[in-house]
Amino acid sequence: MRPLFQVTGLFLLAAATQIFGLACNESVVPDRALQGELREKTGKWAGSLMPADLAGIRELSLPQVGIQSLEGLQHCASLEELTLTVPELQNTCGVPVGVNNQINNLAVLAQLRALRTLKIEGNPIQDLSPLAGLTRLEILAVDRCRVQDITPLQALTALRYLGLSRNHILDISPLVENGGLGPGDAIDLSANPLDPKAEAVGKLRARGVALVVENCSTAPPQNV
C-alpha cells in the first residue's frame, strides 16, 4: 500500500493535469464555425471557451456560417432566441450564397429550457424529440427540413407560430393533441404530403388556428 502522501500527491497531479489540459487545449465548443461566432459574441478571443463564458448569452443569430455541430451550446443556459436558418439565397448561377449550416442533431438543445424562439429552417433535421421539453417555445420554424414525426411538438403548449412547410409530414394528429393551440396561433404546413382535407386539419381550424396547407398532397415525400 502506498503512503498517504503519495496517494494524495498523485490525485492532485491528476487533477491539475486535467484542469491545465482543459484550459490550454480544449474548449466546450469543438465546432470551429460555432466557436468563432461565440467568441465574437462574448468578446473572448484568447483562451478556451468555458461554460461560464456562455451562460449569459440571451440571443444568437447564426445563419450561413457552416456549423455542423451544436455541441457546447447547451452551456448557454440563458438563451431565449436562437436562429440557425439556412437561407434560400442563390447567385445568378443558382449556387447558394455563403457557407450553409449542416445541422442534423438537436440533442444539445434539450437543455436550453429558456428558449422562446427557435428557427432552424433548411437544415437536414429529422428528429425533433430533443425539443419535447422546451415548453417555453413560442415561435418554432422547422421549414425545409426532413421531418416526418411531429409527436414531440404535442407538449409545446406555448407555441404561437409553428413553421413546418416543405417537410415529409403525413400525420398532424399530435398538433390536435396540443391543447395550447387555439385562436391567434398560426401553423404553416404547406408543401407536405398530407391530406389538406384530413379530419385533423378541420379540428385545428375549428379551434381558431390559422392553418396553411397549400400545395399539400398525398404523394410520397421526396428527399429535400
Image (tube, rainbow, N blue to C red):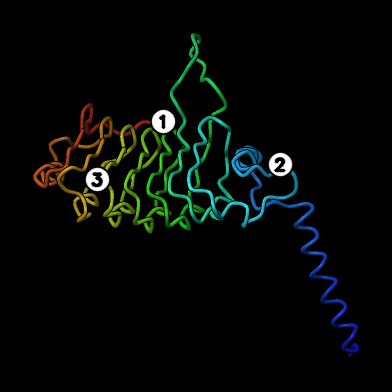
The residue mark sitting in front, 3 or 2, is: 2
Residue beneath the point at 62% across and 57% down: 52
- Which percent across, then down, holds residue 41? 59, 41
- Secondary structure type for disc 2: loop
Q: Hey, what amino acid is under mark 3?
A: Asp
Give the distance between the C-alpha atoms of the residues marked 3 and 2, in whole angstroms: 47 Å
In the picture provided, is 33 more to the left or to the right than 19? left
Q: Earlier in the sequence, mark 1 or mark 3?
A: 3
Image coordinates for residue 199, horizontal then vertical, percent: 12, 44
> Do the numbered discs 2 and 1 sit on residues whose CB atoms are within 8 Å?
no
Where, by quadrant of the figure, is residue 74 drawn?
bottom right
Disc 2 crowd, CA 10 A, few/some/many (<14, 14-19, 20+): few
Q: Nearer the viewer, mark 2 or mark 1?
A: 2
Element on which disc 1 rests: loop
In percent of the image, x 78 and y 51: which residue is there? 25
Viewport quadrant of the C terminus: top left
The residue identified by callout 1 is: 224
The label shown at residue 171 is 3
Query: Which mark sits nearer the N-terminus, 3 or 2?
Result: 2
Amino acid type, callout 2: Trp
Circle 3: is it few (<14), some (14-19), or many (20+) Cα within 10 Å? some
Q: Is mark 3 in CB contact (under 8 Å) with mark 2? A: no
Q: Is residue 156 above or below residue 13?
A: above
Q: CA distance from mark 2 to mark 1?
A: 37 Å
Q: Which mark is residue 82?
A: none
Question: What residue do we see at 65% from left, 42% from top?
Answer: 43
Q: Nearer the viewer, residue 109 or 115?
A: 115
On screen, residue 36 versus residue 214, left or right, reads: right
